[in-house]
């Protein structure tokens, strides 16, 4: 794709986002940036959350990872469906009953201020790294495919992406994002369909033959029953369930959109609809993954391997798209990467800004004249942190989706443990020990996994989030207190 065409696409796409931002910010209220005036249509939120739930990481990592892990990610998808049911029927009613802006307010009501801030802090740390890694992969793709040819250094590309997101979100935040993400989800799904059609045409296959080719391919294995493998069915299914509860139901960036819906019943419809949309999209990604490897095989394209594993699987989809799928495929892929990047990162930045502003700076108690000033300073700080993390991880290799889920297992595990303890027990805590317990649980999970792999050749895989949550719960029982002892704030 030539540089001139890119320079046309980016301004047109961005101007479309700015138009939506302008329309949605015309009647802003004092809290519009954080709660969207609680007036978003539930079906629009559900569709728009596809872009946030998929991201550029899923766009390239899920298809690319098929070469090393077959279709085992489908086991994870099955688990997510159960996780969304838990979110819809357990967590959503609680959040709406409490009328929260940040979901970690639940921990304050249930346990106290220290637990509340600990949960929020773990989210902020995890979300900062998760958002930065998603941004990292997106910028790497854009840099390699397009901006290197324009002579633009990668650090400037990172700054441009963050600046563009700031321009269309800094006024209305989540109120604008609900609408822009719906548009970007549409572009993202369109990209996948165009890629599949391109491969189908290149291989000269009918729709029926395409399906048969996918099912007959050696990588089409759906279930893994090797108990020693990190992708064993039970590990993947439980990980899908728990990671969905943690990374969606206990994640401010995902739930903040749901909380912009006025009624709890409609919010439940949103979560259930989104669960169907995201499962269908991710399954489509898996099918695309087999087609990418099938295309490479049919065209004698040699893919680098080390120790029997494909190297840089995240680069497969971009490579084939830009070199073999024609101009339309390249344009669609470029738009898809931009759309998935904006849809994911804008939500993360807004959620981080909201969590810091509400959970640590008590912005709701601040005079109205100073709220916007505080929000803008926090927003600038969040962007700076993401920029620094991306630079620090720039030379990282491998499937980034695995890195994100691994980090999430250590950082969201304690949050999951806190919520499960709060929801399903009646214990009270000696709160000063809660931060220590959460850190200890994460470290203990890491050590246990190392020992298990060394002595038992058993990898927890994505199940480290379950181990982490269970350890958190066990340790929390060690610091429970007499419920008759009164502590302020409970």
Image (cartoon, grey):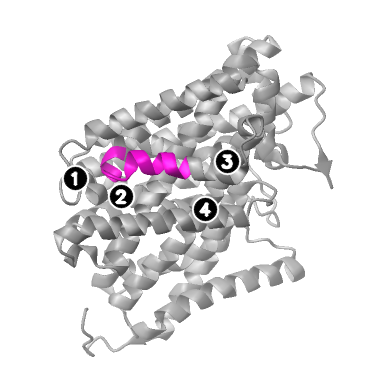
Name the one closer to the observer, 88 or 159: 159
The tag earlier along the polypeptide, 3 or 2, is: 3
Looking at the rendered structure, the number of numbered marks drawn on it comes to: 4
Q: Which residue is depicted at the point 38% across and 68% down?
A: 119
* Residue on which the image places disc 2: 256
Name the one closer to the observer, 85 or 69: 69
Callout 1: SS: helix
The tag earlier along the polypeptide, 2 or 1, is: 1
The tag earlier along the polypeptide, 3 or 4, is: 3
Q: Which residue is depicted at the point 75% across and 63% down?
A: 457
Which stretch did the figure color magenta?
161-176
Cα distance between the residues tagged 1 and 4: 31 Å
Q: Quadrant of the N terminus?
A: top right
Q: Are marks 3 and 4 in contact (CB under 8 Å)?
A: no
Q: Main secondary structure of the magenta part?
A: helix
Nearer the viewer's eye, disc 3 or disc 1? Answer: 3
Residue 38's disc is: 1
Cα distance between the residues tagged 2 and 1: 10 Å
The tag earlier along the polypeptide, 3 or 1, is: 1
* Residue on which the image places disc 3: 139
Q: Are marks 1 and 4 in contact (CB under 8 Å)?
A: no
Callout 2: SS: helix
Q: Would residue 278 be counted in the magenta stretch? A: no
């Amino acid at each position: 794709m030539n540089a001139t065409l890119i320079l046309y696409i980016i301004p047109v796409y961005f101007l479309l986002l700015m138009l939506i931002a302008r329309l949605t910010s015309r009647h802003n209220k004092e809290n519009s940036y954080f709660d969207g005036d609680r007036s978003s249509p539930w079906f629009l939120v559900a569709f728009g959350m596809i872009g946030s739930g998929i991201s550029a990481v899923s766009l390239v990592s899920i298809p690319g990872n098929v070469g090393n892990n077959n279709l085992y990610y489908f086991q994870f998808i099955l688990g997510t469906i159960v996780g969304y049911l838990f979110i819809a029927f357990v967590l959503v009613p609680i959040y709406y009953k409490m009328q929260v802006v940040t979901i970690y307010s639940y921990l304050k009501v249930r346990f106290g201020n220290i637990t509340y801030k600990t949960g929020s802090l773990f989210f902020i740390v995890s979300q900062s790294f998760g958002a930065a890694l998603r941004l990292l992969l997106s910028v790497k793709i854009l840099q390699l495919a397009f901006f290197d040819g324009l002579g633009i250094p990668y650090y400037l590309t990172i700054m441009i992406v963050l600046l563009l997101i700031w321009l269309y979100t800094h006024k209305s935040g989540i109120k604008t994002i609900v609408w822009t993400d719906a548009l970007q989800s549409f572009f993202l799904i369109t990209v996948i369909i165009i890629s599949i059609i391109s491969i189908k045409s290149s291989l000269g296959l009918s729709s029926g033959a395409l399906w048969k080719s996918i099912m007959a391919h050696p990588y089409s294995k759906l279930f893994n029953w090797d108990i020693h493998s990190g992708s064993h069915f039970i590990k993947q299914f439980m990980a899908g369930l728990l990671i969905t509860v943690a990374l969606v139901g206990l994640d401010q960036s995902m739930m903040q959109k749901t909380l912009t819906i006025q009624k709890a019943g409609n919010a439940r419809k949103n979560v259930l609809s989104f669960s169907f949309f995201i499962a269908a999209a991710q399954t489509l990604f898996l099918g695309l993954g087999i087609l990418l490897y099938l295309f490479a095989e049919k065209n004698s394209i040699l893919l680098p391997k080390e120790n029997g594993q494909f190297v840089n699987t995240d680069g497969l989809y971009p490579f084939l798209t830009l070199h073999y799928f024609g101009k339309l495929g390249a344009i669609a892929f470029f738009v898809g990467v931009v759309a998935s990047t904006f849809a994911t990162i804008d939500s993360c930045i807004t959620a981080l800004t909201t969590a810091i502003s509400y959970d640590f700076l008590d912005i709701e108690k601040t005079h109205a004249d100073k709220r916007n000033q505080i929000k803008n300073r926090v927003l600038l700080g969040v962007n700076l942190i993401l920029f620094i993390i991306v630079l620090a991880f720039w030379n990282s290799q491998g499937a980034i989706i695995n890195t994100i889920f691994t980090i999430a297992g250590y950082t969201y595990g304690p949050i999951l443990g806190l919520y499960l303890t709060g929801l399903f027990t009646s214990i009270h805590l000696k709160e000063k020990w809660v931060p220590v317990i959460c850190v200890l649980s994460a470290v203990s999970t890491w050590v246990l996994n190392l020992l298990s792999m060394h002595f038992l050749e058993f990898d927890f895989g994505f199940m480290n989030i379950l181990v982490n949550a269970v350890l958190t719960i066990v340790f929390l029982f060690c610091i429970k207190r007499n419920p008759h002892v009164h502590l302020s704030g409970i």
